[in-house]
Image (spheres, rainbow, N blue to C red):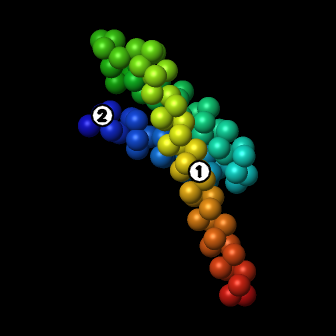
């Protein structure tokens, strides 16, 4: 359960937070791509004090984590742009 939370839910939340804080697509995706592996590494270190997982495990899953975070940014940005276009058509 912890692995699902750390490797899938956490990068999704990081992507959503980065697009909410930084409205520019390029900057938000860069922040998500850099921030997601760092946060996952810190979570692995905090949740596993007996060192069954180490920095090599975080390095091996970092492409997956970055991809999930950046895809979340892209989907959220596309959704907000679509809403903005619909609002412009109505008014």
Q: Which residue is drawn at 62% across and 73% down?
A: 83
For this orientation, the residue located farthest to the top is: 51
The mark lying in front, picked from 1 and 2, is 1
Q: Residue at x 48, y 35 (%)?
A: 64
Instruction: Name the element at disc 2.
Output: helix
User: Quick check: can you spot residue 17?
Assistant: no
Label 2 belongs to which residue?
A: 2
Please provide percent x and percent y for residue 34: 62, 32
Q: Is residue 1 above or below residue 85?
A: above
Quarter of the N terminus within the rendering: top left
Please provide percent x and percent y for residue 55: 46, 15
Please provide percent x and percent y for residue 73: 59, 50
Q: Residues within 10 Å of mark 2 (few under 14, many from 20)?
A: few
Label 1 belongs to which residue?
A: 73
User: Quick check: can you spot residue 31?
Assistant: yes
In 3D space, how far apart are the residues under numbered discs 1 and 2 (Cα atoms)? 23 Å
Mark linked to residue 28: none
Task: Answer left or right for 33 relative to 64.
Answer: right
Q: Which of 63 and 44 is in front in this view?
A: 63
Task: Answer left or right for 26 relative to 60.
Answer: right
Task: Answer left or right for 84 relative to 66.
Answer: right
Among the 4 quarters of the image, the one containing residue 81:
bottom right
Instruction: Name the element at disc 1.
Output: helix
For this orientation, the residue located farthest to the left is: 1
Please provide percent x and percent y for residue 25: 70, 51
Quarter of the C terminus within the rendering: bottom right
Q: In this view, does 50 lie above or below 31?
A: above
Q: How crowded is mark 1: few (under 14 residues within 10 Å), some or many (20 or more)?
A: many
């Amino acid at each position: 359960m912890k692995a699902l939370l750390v490797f899938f839910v956490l990068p999704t939340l990081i992507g959503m937070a980065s697009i909410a804080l930084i409205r520019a697509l390029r900057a938000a995706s860069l922040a998500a791509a850099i921030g997601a592996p760092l946060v996952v590494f810190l979570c692995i270190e905090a949740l596993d004090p007996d060192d069954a997982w180490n920095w090599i495990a975080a390095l091996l899953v970092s492409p997956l984590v970055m991809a999930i975070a950046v895809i979340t940014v892209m989907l959220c940005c596309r959704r907000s742009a679509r809403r903005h276009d619909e609002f412009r058509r109505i008014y």
